[in-house]
Amino acid sequence: MLSLLKSFVVQSFRASERPDLRELADWIDNAQNVAVKAIVKLVGDSLKRDGHISDSAEKAIIAVKEECARVPPLGVPPEPPRSKTPFLDEYLSIISDIADLASLRHALLLKGFIHSESSWSLWIFDLNKGGPYTFDIREGLFDAPPSIWLPEGINVFLFDERAESDFLSLNEELGRSNNDLPKSLSLDHRDKVMEIYEDYVEIEVWKTKEVKDRVGHHTEYESYRERRDVDKDFAGIKKLIASFPIAFEKREKTLRDLHRLTKH
């Protein structure tokens, strides 16, 4: 699924002060998938290498546009073979794309998740593990259906929705450090994504119980797995995709400001 990264590129170019890049955004929005794939790779490579969309990447994208104008498009591409897990295939594509760019830094806060629009998802990346991350669809054991496990080095935690201003400021705060999380994003006893199925997501949740022993009364935490159904209107996925370019832009602000200083 190209919609997430394509949306990111289009929004980045539309926000540019350069008229030629704003015009290029409209072209990318309507370009064929082959061209979009080439452009997304150019942008992704530039972000990983430079931390922003570099001048050389912009020139290469313009060259792709000119080449597409010179060479007529081919016929309709053949349909891919049918999959036994069509929903999981789409989920996998989305979370892979997010991880590919978001893992340039140690955390990114997004709105929604695969199953629901009513929460925010905090994506945490172990920078010592590095990337790229490989996501797989695993066959279920016994009678269990296939599922996606997050690869080692990636964790996703769920938070209640907050104000829009908090979403923007928290991502900007995440961009100020490559090690620490804001205090309001504490992971203590936080709901954590464990497995993604076609029809539901398994979450590790916590419950408390009061215990009385020789010392006295105290509270203990126990974790268990809870299934949360995927909203098949896909409002959570729409929110996830729409929030990505906004969150990424806010997170990169501090580093981008530093790049501007060091370039002069």
Image (cartoon, rainbow, N blue to C red):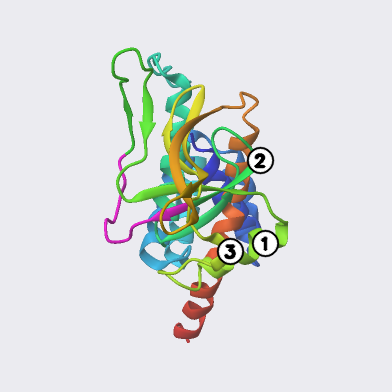
Question: Which image quadrant is residue 31 in?
Answer: top right
Q: Is 181 or 171 nearer to us in this picture?
A: 181
* Image position, residue 108 (x, y; %): 50, 57
Instruction: Using the numbered discs, state the Cα–Cα distance from disc 2 to disc 1 in whole angstroms.
Output: 15 Å
Residue situated furthest bottom in the rendering: 264
Q: CA distance from mark 3 to mark 1?
A: 10 Å
The number of numbered discs placed on residues in the rendered structure image is 3
Task: Give yes or no for contact between labels 3 and 1 (Cβ–Cβ under 8 Å).
Answer: yes
Quick check: can you spot residue 122? yes
Q: Secondary structure at mark 2?
A: loop
Which residue is painted at 42% across and 44% down in the image? Answer: 38
The residue that label 3 is drawn on is 184
Quick one: label 3, few (<14), some, or many (20+) residues within 10 Å?
few
Q: Which residue is mark 1?
A: 166
Q: Kindly identify which residue carries mark 2.
A: 118
Could you say where residue 128 lies in the image, as x and y percent from the top left? Answer: 27, 61
Disc on the earlier residue, 3 or 1: 1
What is the three-letter code of the residue carrying label 2?
Ser
Q: Amino acid at mark 3?
A: Ser
